[in-house]
Amino acid sequence: MHNVLHTIDRVNTWIGQLFGWFVMALTLFVTYEVFSRYALGSPHAWSFDAMNMMYGALFMMAGAYTLSKNGHVRGDVLYGFFPPRLQAGLDLTLYVVFFIPGVVALAWAGYNYAAESFMINEHSTITADGPPIYPFKAIIPIAGVTLLFQGFVEMVYCVDCLRNGRWAKRDKDVEEVDVDKLKDMVHAEPEYLKNTDTRDSDTKGSQP
């Protein structure tokens, strides 16, 4: 079972990292468009649509990756200090009540939007002779499916944590904040903090 879970994690990580390159592509594309518009006097009417679709694809396809790395914003600042079983119980409840129904609706509605867009060969109407947008709309149900799979993975991890009292180990990836070190600092003993202040004072005093 855990091999299947880790496989889904790795696939969603690979998808997120792949679409992460859209950040570089968008940067280069915007730079070229600005240069073409103001230096060459040759703007492209379809560039605005292309930028929107690239950013939208990045935003949607990174959802499952962000969920697998526990990177979505939480509204409760106390959550990180709850015991693992309480965290797992809250997460599992929210997944069942809100996440799964919402993502199923996203995938279903996205499929209908994409199917209709393909049938009518839909193009953007924001600009004249806009680019086709049915490939972009096809991203919606795909993103919903990846989120749904990752949601089931997270629910299994929650059940596992409720049984064992600890979170299962996950594949490591880039982290913006080292949460474990932050918790250690918050729960640090006064003697440790005193020694840290002393070392800092000695370091500052030794500087020329």
Image (tube, grey):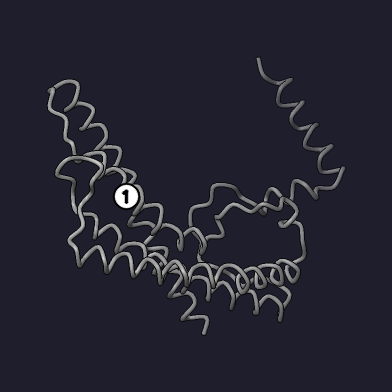
The residue at 19%/21% (across/down) is 38
Q: Mark 1 Cα within 10 Å, few/some/many (few <14, many 20+)?
A: few
Quadrant hosting residue 111: bottom left
Q: Is residue 136 above or below residue 51?
A: below
- Determine whether the residue tagged by mark 1 lies in a helix, strand or loop: helix
Q: Is residue 182 left or right of residue 107?
A: right
Q: Is residue 157 above or below residue 55?
A: below
Q: Position of residue 125 (x, y in %)?
A: 23, 46
Residue underneath mark 1: 21
The residue at 16%/30% (across/down) is 43
- The residue closer to the viewer here, 196 or 143, is 143
Q: Position of residue 168 (x, y in %)?
A: 61, 72
Q: Is residue 130 above or below residue 63?
A: above
Q: Is residue 9 left or right of residue 129?
A: right
| Amino acid type indicated by mark 1 | Trp
The residue at 69%/70% (across/down) is 88
The residue at 18%/49% (across/down) is 131
Q: Position of residue 74 (x, y in %)?
A: 64, 54
